[in-house]
Image (cartoon, rainbow, N blue to C red):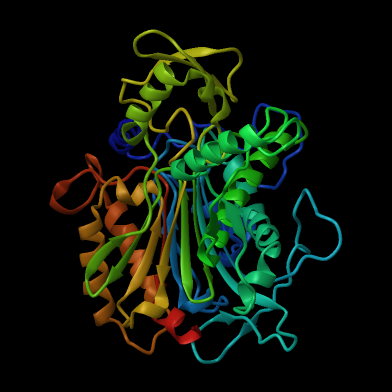
Amino acid sequence: MLTRVKSAVANFMGGIMAGSSGSEHGSGSDLPLRFPYGRPEFLGLSADEVECSADHIARPILILNKETKRLPWTTGYAEVINAGKSTHNEDQASCEVLFVKKKTGGTNSTPNKNTSTKRRSSLPNGEGLQLKENSENDGINLYYWSLFDGHAGSGAAVVASKLLHHHIVEQLQEIVEILKNSAVLPPTCLGEEPESMVTNSRTLTRAASLRGGVGAPGSPNTPPTRFFTEKKIQHESLVTGAIESAFKEMDLQIERERTVYSISGGCTALVVVYMLGKLYVANAGDSRAIIIRNKEVIPMSSEFTPETERQRLQYLAFMQPHLLGNEFTHLEFPRRVQRKEVGKRMLYRDFNMTGWAYKSIEEDDLKFPLIYGEGKKVRVYNLLQYEHGPEDVLILATDGLWDVLLNEEVAEAVTNFLPNCDPDDPHRYTLAAQDLVMRARGVLKDRGWRISNDRLGSGDDISVYVIPLIHGNNLS
């Protein structure tokens, strides 16, 4: 894969290639930036610190400062820049504590800070940022974590990190009245007409036609009676649909704003939303989320790569080629499939190139898929079903971690690390995130960055959240 090739080259050069490749955020365009490049706001870095973090040779690991306001649930976070494949760190992260209430007035096509009411307070009990109680009880508390891995530049990742949660809030505002009131019945939708009902309807139609004239039930001028099944939509499905719609809206906004802003490349998106006792994990791309519970690994995302999508691509290309032009996203990659040639080759357009190019889907040097379709999934984890201990965590990380560490290696590292920390230290989850990043990055040796057993370390950007689940139980 392209990731491993780039990592190998960067490791071999020891990071001296810094700045020589990759797309600069907003480079090559006279358009203004939508948002300036930076590191996650919750890190609280100064401009000088951001500049120092971009050392591709030393590759310092950034973590939350103990003096900085902690993330909700004492979440841990750590990151490191790549070994020279791009000037900027193309990963981005954001974390928000939100309050969602019913929408009033018109819709806002470009979300801003006023989309939702955020109420934060720094609590002395070690749980970090929490929501204050709402006396009016007119909405729902929401916690949000996200990771974005930029492709061909950091522009789309920066934009998505600033705006995607606003789109999610806007979609949830449409259903908040249903979600917060258990007495409100969920909506229904009409399902397909069962075959048995269709048969009965036709039988009645023929019988009626023998008795009636024009306009009588069953006559040629009267539509046949149709029967539909009613299907209740569960609250969980409403939230899942809202998150999926938010992904689509974010993608459309990036596409729309490329004409007025300089937004480079595309990006993956890995998002976690906690509300009403459940975690909703949405993924588009090759980042990954896992839950570690009682030392066991529970996958919480499905990766979307050329390998996982090849069969579906080939099926669509030969059986339903008209669908290929409709599947695209900037929340996954900057390319759009237009048609399929006989054999293996696909025609695609890269938004960072001029003109068209051919690429074979059989080649393994494609890191990212050519089209975006069934790769985006939302998985749900009900915190109320389990009692979690302090070592039970949700891990979110970009592919820089997973390219070199297996799920089981990550789980073993975390479950061995946390018990050795002071249980009263709320910073221990940040130290666990730092430990994971260090394990994946490795140390710089004569032959490049190396990890345990002298394996090749990750030369990619690495970003990691460690979210303790015990705090979710306390809130529920």
Residue 168 position, x and y percent, is 63, 58
Pick the front one: 451 or 133: 133
Pick the front one: 325 or 348: 325
Residue 220 sits above or below residue 428 on the image: above
Outermost residue on the left side: it is 453
**In the image, 289: left or right of 110?**
left
Residue 201 position, x and y percent, is 55, 41
Pick the front one: 183 or 407: 183
Pick the front one: 396 or 138: 138
Q: Quadrant of residue 170?
A: bottom right
Quarter that holds the N terminus:
top left
The residue at 22%/39% (across/down) is 447
**In the image, 436: left or right of 466?**
left
**In the image, 54: left or right of 400?**
right
Residue 97 sits above or below residue 255 on the image: below
Residue 322 position, x and y percent, is 53, 20
Q: Can residue 342 be seen?
A: yes
Q: Quadrant of residue 154?
A: top right
